[in-house]
Structure formats: structure tokens, C-alpha cells
């Protein structure tokens, strides 16, 4: 919740306390998820070296199924793809997101499928493939609507706003950014609200 509200320092403090308690109690079940979540906060804080090192610890732990649930394994793939994307290694990012998609599809893990599709969209946009970005985002939105996932819908609306803008369809772009803004305000998602407004 702190992360979604843009309160990253508070989120990091809570995540580090949670990890410390987990290590103290001696139960290492799904331990990788703690490092993954800590990495996500470092990402939001723009501390890339700590993001990468936390994620690398999570990835190593995830090699043992005891330390990472299937959802955590998919989350780690998500973050590795994010690093590739941030470093403009787009082919690697696509490969990782496609692995995430296929593994999630095989396990009928709709959150992983929708997230992989949402991740592919900005990569396709960066590669000047707006039509491909549109297809993946519309598929992701359909899944998120079926799941009644408001955050997923918000992300899809903002992505559609950016895609329609790239395609030169300003009315559709504005409509989707407005849909995103309504959801972002309602749920107090600071970062996503900024995207909706800036769009």
C-alpha cells in the first residue's frame, strides 16, 4: 500500500523489517519474495544498483522451490524483464516477458498472463510497433476486467492512452487517460495519477 501511494521510504522500512522478522523466525519458505519486494521499492526510489542486487538475491533463492512460490518466480521474471527494459535491452525483455506469459498461461495464472502482456506493451512502443502494443494491451485489459482488478485496468487505460497518442488518435487517447485518472484518484495511486495527467 505504501508503495502504491508513493510513500517509498515507509515501504522500504516495512519491507526491511519484514525480512528481518522472517530471518529471525527461522522459516525460509518463500524467502525470495521479501528480496523481490525490497528490490521493487529500490526501483521506485531510483536506486538501480540495490534494485539489481536485491533481485539477484531473489533470483538465486528462487532456484530452490522452497524459497519461491510460483507467483514469486513469475514476479522475479517480471522484474528481470523490467531491468532489461530500463537498460534498453528490448529483445531480452521481450524474451523474458514471453517466458513469463507462457509459464503463467500453462499454470492458468491470469495475473501473470495479464502482467506479461502489460509489460510487453511499452517495449513494443519503444520499438515503434504501436499496433502490436495495442493488441497486447487490449488483451491485458480484457483479463483485468474479468478479474475485476482495478489496478490492472488503470495500467491498461494509461497504456492505451499512450498507444492511441502514438497512433495519432487523440480522442481515444484522452478518453483512456481520463478513465485511468478516475481510477487513480479513487484508489490514491499517486504514480499512476501522474501518468494519467501527464498523458
Image: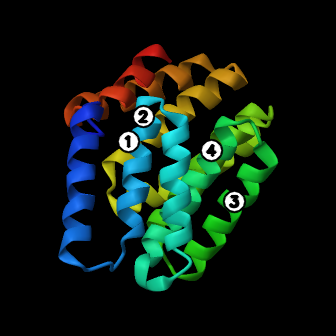
Q: Looking at the picture, how far across and down is residue 177, in whole percent?
A: 45, 25
How packed mark 3 is, by other alpha carbons closer than 10 Å (few <14, some 14-19, many 20 or more), is many
- Residue 161 numbered tag: none
Mark 2 lies on residue? 44
- Residue 96 numbered tag: 3
Mark 4 lies on residue? 83
Q: Looking at the picture, how far across and down is residue 40, in whole percent?
A: 42, 46
Q: Secondary structure at mark 2?
A: helix
- Using the numbered discs, state the Cα–Cα distance from disc 4 to disc 3 in whole angstroms: 11 Å
Q: Which mark is first along the chain, 4 or 1?
A: 1
- Residue 41 numbered tag: 1
Q: Do tag 1 and tag 2 residues touch (Cβ < 8 Å)?
A: yes
- Using the numbered discs, state the Cα–Cα distance from disc 2 to disc 4 in whole angstroms: 12 Å
The residue that appears at 63% across and 31% down in the rendered structure is: 163
Q: Which mark is first along the chain, 4 or 2?
A: 2
Residue 7 lies in what quarter of the image? top left
Q: Secondary structure at mark 4?
A: helix
Position of 106 with respect to 143 (left or right) is: right
Amino acid at each position: 500500500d505504501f508503495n502504491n501511494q508513493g510513500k517509498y521510504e515507509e515501504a522500504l522500512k516495512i519491507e526491511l523489517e519484514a525480512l528481518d522478522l522472517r530471518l529471525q523466525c527461522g522459516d525460509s519458505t518463500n524467502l525470495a519474495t521479501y528480496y523481490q519486494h525490497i528490490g521493487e521499492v529500490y526501483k521506485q526510489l531510483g536506486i538501480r544498483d540495490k534494485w539489481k542486487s536485491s533481485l539477484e538475491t531473489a533470483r538465486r533463492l528462487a532456484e530452490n522451490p522452497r524459497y519461491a512460490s510460483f507467483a514469486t518466480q513469475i514476479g522475479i521474471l517480471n522484474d528481470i524483464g523490467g531491468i532489461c527494459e530500463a537498460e534498453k535491452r528490448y529483445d531480452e525483455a521481450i524474451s523474458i516477458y514471453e517466458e513469463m506469459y507462457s509459464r503463467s498461461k500453462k499454470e492458468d495464472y491470469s495475473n501473470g498472463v495479464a502482467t506479461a502482456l502489460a509489460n510487453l506493451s511499452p517495449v513494443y512502443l519503444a520499438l515503434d510497433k504501436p499496433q502490436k502494443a495495442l493488441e497486447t494491451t487490449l488483451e491485458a485489459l480484457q483479463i483485468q476486467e474479468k478479474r475485476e482488478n482495478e489496478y490492472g485496468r488503470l495500467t491498461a487505460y494509461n497504456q492505451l492512452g499512450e498507444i492511441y497518442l502514438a497512433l495519432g488518435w487523440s480522442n481515444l487517447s484522452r478518453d483512456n487517460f481520463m478513465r485511468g485518472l478516475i481510477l487513480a484518484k479513487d484508489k490514491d495511486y499517486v504514480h499512476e495519477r501522474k501518468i494519467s495527467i501527464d498523458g
